[in-house]
Amino acid sequence: MGGITLLCRVGYSVTLHEREGRGVQERIVDEVAAALREAKSVVVLTGAGVSAESGIPTFRDAMEGLWEKFDPMELATPEAFDKHPRVVARWYDERRLQCASCKPNPGHAALAEMERRLTGKGGRFTLLTQNVDGLHQAAGSANVAELHGSIWRWRCLRCGLTREERGGAFDRYPPRCECGGWKRPAIVWFGEGLPEEALAASERALRSCDLFFSVGTSAVVQPSASFIHVARSRGAKTVEVNREPTPITRLVDWSIRGKSGEVLPALVARTWGGAEGGT
Ligand code: APR
């Protein structure tokens, strides 16, 4: 899977065919809970929707205030940084500061609990995230592969030094390294390659997974959008948790419509009898 770049496919159409209605959704949660109890190796792919309830806007949400006239999809490219380094660095710094003020929500906590439960009985759990906010780790998730890098790490374009940046706003944009070079966020922009390590971890996890979740992602950005196909081709059962239909809704074994911060805690409770206790 090496050398894979970030690609976006937009303008999909969805034919609604999901099983709707409260009773039906309850039954689906029961079925997924039973699958989770049986699972030996679980992979969860997450996207911006998981952090939405922590107050971090998704990429497709409208931009506010000063940034109203910008399209985040257009800022997230190396070309945008080449052309407007100050604007792009400032936008990412504002997102970094915004992340600093946000806390994990019950969806993040439920995924951390899911990992503890599964690994506690000798199973495997891998979290593949497209998010750069670090909230999964903050919630206690341990086996996390950051497919799109991290907004907390900034890399010097001249000497390559990469550092955690947990302090306040940078004093200039783009921020400067000690060597004098410009620093950029160590995140993956459209057209750039994904980190080899994260891709290798994804490949390893998908190869053996028997249950795959796609949570809070629009499932249009490659290569992550293709993970479900890999999981299915290896015989895994598949689940989607999303507020809205996506291009994979028709494909999954179970589609749970709702907020991840509500659905995931309910699922964990249904599976193991409550977030804190019971079996
Ligand atoms: N619970 C569950 N799903 C939600 C919630 C919620 N509370 N809020 C929003 N969603 C869903 C939306 O319905 C949408 O399908 O989350 C998805 C967010 O989609 P995107 O904004 O496209 O985010 P994502 O799929 O992570 O985008 C992938 O694209 O912009 C690039 O690199 C960036 O990592 C990002 C990648």
Image (tube, rainbow, N blue to C red):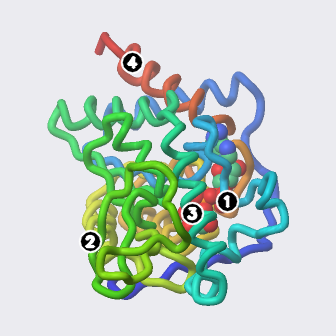
Q: Quadrant of residue 83?
A: bottom right
Disc 2 to disc 3, how far (Cα)? Answer: 23 Å
Point out which mark residue 197 bears. 2
Q: At 73% from the left edge and 40% from the top edge, which residue is drawn?
A: 19
Q: Which residue position holds label 4?
A: 275
- Vertical placement of residue 237 versus 154, above or below: above
Q: Quadrant of the N terminus?
A: bottom left
Q: Which residue position holds label 3?
A: 92
Position in image of residue 25 (x %, y %)? 66, 30
Give, as a three-letter code, the residue at label 3. Tyr
Disc 3 to disc 1, how far (Cα)? Answer: 13 Å
Tell which of 132 and 215 is nearer to you. 132
Structural crowding at the residue carrying mark 2, measured as other residues with C-alpha within 10 Å and reported as few (<14), some (14–19) or many (≥20): few
Q: At 47% from the left edge and 51% from the top edge, which residue is drawn?
A: 133
Marked residue nearer the N-terminal end (2 or 1): 1
Disc 1 to disc 4, how far (Cα)? Answer: 30 Å
Q: Secondary structure at mark 3?
A: helix
Tell which of 180 and 52 is nearer to you. 180
Mark 1 C-beta closer than 8 Å to ligand 1:
yes
- Check whether the beta carbons of the residues at disc 2 and disc 4 lie within 8 A of each other: no
